[in-house]
Every structure is written in structure tokens, then in C-alpha cells.
Image: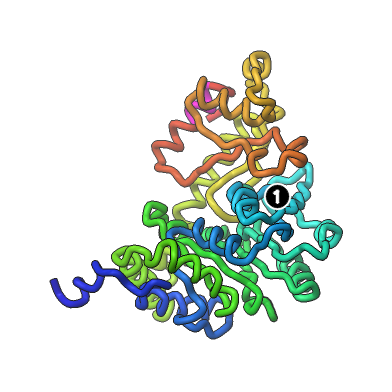
Amino acid sequence: MGERKKSDHSYTRGYGHQHLVNVLSQLYSQLLGVEINSQTDILITVGAYLSLYYAFIGWLNPGDEVIIFEPAYDSYVSQIKMAGAIPIPIVLELDPNATSSAGYVLNINAVKSKITPKTKMIVLNNPNNPTGKLYTRSELEQLAKIAIENDFIVLTDEVYEWMVYPGGEMIRFASLPGMYERTITIGSAGKVFSATGWKTGWSIGPKWLLEPMKKIHENCVFACPTPIQEALARSFEEELLLWKEGKFNQSYLKNGIIAELLPKRDLLAKYLKSAGFRPIIPDAGYFMIADFSHLDGSSSFLANRKSENGEGIDYDFCRWLCREKKLAGIPPSAFYSPQNRQGNDHYIRLCFFKKDETLQQAIQILGDSFGVNK
């Protein structure tokens, strides 16, 4: 093997393969509008999941409070509690007539009401999983003001950053004035290049915010797999070259991923509506929330409903749909704290980033179960 190939199969730099952090520095310096130091401001981790864990374990002390917005990715609460801290959930308010994820609105007064002397961190998932919500500039600027006034750390999970549909605007929180110096931005190669099995993520932020995370990393993982990091570096380099040459239509990040996702999103929404669901069309991401409470074909499910462990109706519906109809979905109440589940348990979350034949099978099941008009 050549020298470069030999090095690609040896241990690499512990905080991140030099080739990869150099390219990420170029990319995110453009995206965030700041000069990112590849040596101090980037940490490569085994998936974005581990970046979250490092941030919580590295920065939180027992009794600290962390504001999260629900519905929230379910690992936040568990990891915050593992650090001995206390998650403080604030529910995104949903317009009852909402047809898109823009109907989920952040009540900034609710945020202010939850702030105490123990509050240390805000966790922001933008775009949001499971709803596909994109936070508005106004919402983000108000959160930024709160963070500055109260000296909060902000942890931004932006792994779906490239899956934004036409008409939406992805505003990276660290790009707002004064935010880079107090923000840890988390990204995911698995989401960027639709290769979740590569299990590689990164944390980007100022040196002082990443230092405790690096201490955990060097004594826990030491270094992430070199070949995957090298492959990612080359993939990002190709993207940057296409951008430089103005070939955005050939860019997977700028065009390819949405060109693939958009027709799948619209197809699923069409047949969910036809089946009697009320889908909430996501502005980003590859999940769709749908209200099943008005289904005509749900009578057999409702008549034979047998709740297990006192779970919400969405657990029962998803379990019934999977066991009896062979269509898998996730109960969205799993993304809420127990006290916030009531009133948010008549939905299902479906993933539409599937092969076309899989989506067609799902449509067939909808037709057989709920009388879809094709």
C-alpha cells in the first residue's frame, strides 16, 4: 500500500483525523461565519450520540437544570439524568389546525418562566426530531438573548441540517451574533451522507467548551476509526469543490438529498390523507407526524384496545399497526415527559426515507387497513 493508504489504517489523531477536521473547519467556517480552528474547535466522536453524552457528562453537575423542548429526542432526558442533572421540559405549542411542522411554536415566555438559579444549559434540536420543525429566526434570536442574559451554555443538535425542504431556512444557532462562544454544535456524518452505519459525529465550538468533552473522549474512546474519517474528509472535499465551481445541482448536500426525500415525503402525505390521517408535513428531516384520532378504519383497533403498562393510546395504536398490519411506526408520546403526554398521544411518527418498494408496501397496507383511495 502507498504511504497514505497505510496511514489510513493506523491510529489517527485522538480528537479527530487531521484531514477531516481540516475540511470540517473549512465547511463550518463558511456556514457559521466564524473562523474555526481545526486543532481546538472540533472533536470527532463515535456518532452524534456520543457528542451529546460528552457534553452532558462534561458540563453538568448534580442538581443543574437543563431546558429541553418537547417533543424531544428521547436520549436527552436519559443522558441528562445520567449526569445527575434535571431536565426541564417545555412543550412546543401546536396549532390544532396545523398542517405543517411550522405549527409547532416556541412560547418564549414559557422558557423565561422555567429559568432558575440552577439553570445551566439549553438543548436545541433544529431541525427537530420527531416533528421536522425548523425554528424561526425570531425564536432563535429570542433564545440567544436569554442565553446571553443568563450566561447559559447552548447545546445545538443540528444533525438534520441538510434535510430542509424548499421554502424553509436552516439557521445555525452558532451563526447568530455572540452565540459561537457559548454554543456546542453537533453534527452527524450518518445523517449528512445517509450512511448511519458509519457512526461518526462531531462537536464544534470554542476551545473552552470542548475541553471537558475531550478529557472524557481521550480516556474513553481515544480515537475514532481512521478509514471512515478519511472517507468522510474526501466526501466533504468533493462537496466543497462542487460549491466552489457553482455545480450545486450535482451536490448531494445542496440538492441530492432533498431531491430524493421530497417526493417520498409528498407521496406518504398524500396517502395518509387519503386514509383519513391528518399528517403534519415536516419542513425538514425524514419523519412525519400524523394524527390518527379521526380514522374511520380504527374502530377495530379501538374496540380491542388493551393498554400495556398504562401507556398512551399511541403506543397501543403503533403496537396494533405493527402486530396486526405489519406497518411500523413510533408513538410520539415517547418524546414527551410523562406529565406532558396527555393530549399528545393521538399521533404516530413514520419514517419515509425508505426504498420506493417499501413505501409502496406501506401504501398497500394503508389501503387494506383504512380504505385508501389510490
Q: Residue at x 44, y 53 (%)?
A: 260
Asked where in the image residue 140 lies, by quadrant, the reply is bottom right
Q: Residues within 10 Å of mark 1 (few under 14, many from 20)?
A: many
Q: How many marks?
A: 1
User: Label 1 amino acid?
Assistant: Glu
Q: Residue at x 67, y 22 (%)?
A: 296
Left or right: where 36 falls relative to 136: left
Residue 190 location, x and y as percent? 43, 57
Residue 346 location, x and y as percent? 70, 33
Quadrant of the frame with the N terminus: bottom left
Q: Residue at x 20, y 71 (%)?
A: 5
- Observer-nearest of 142 and 214: 214
- Observer-nearest of 248 and 185: 185
Please tell me whether residue 28 belongs to the stretch shown in magenta. Answer: no
Residue 211 location, x and y as percent? 54, 75
Q: Is residue 359 above or below residue 313?
A: below
- Observer-nearest of 172 and 214: 214
Magenta region's main secondary structure? helix
Residue 167 location, x and y as percent? 62, 61
Please tell me whether residue 366 belongs to the stretch shown in magenta. Answer: yes
Q: Residue at x 51, y 52 (%)?
A: 262
Asked where in the image residue 338 lies, by quadrant, the reply is top right
Spot the residue most to the left: 1
Residue 255 showing in the rendered view:
no
Q: Secondary structure at mark 1?
A: strand
Boundaries of the magenta span: 363-368
Residue 241 showing in the rendered view:
yes
Left or right: where 137 falls relative to 108: left
Disc 1 marks which residue?
70
Q: Is residue 360 above or below residue 335?
A: above
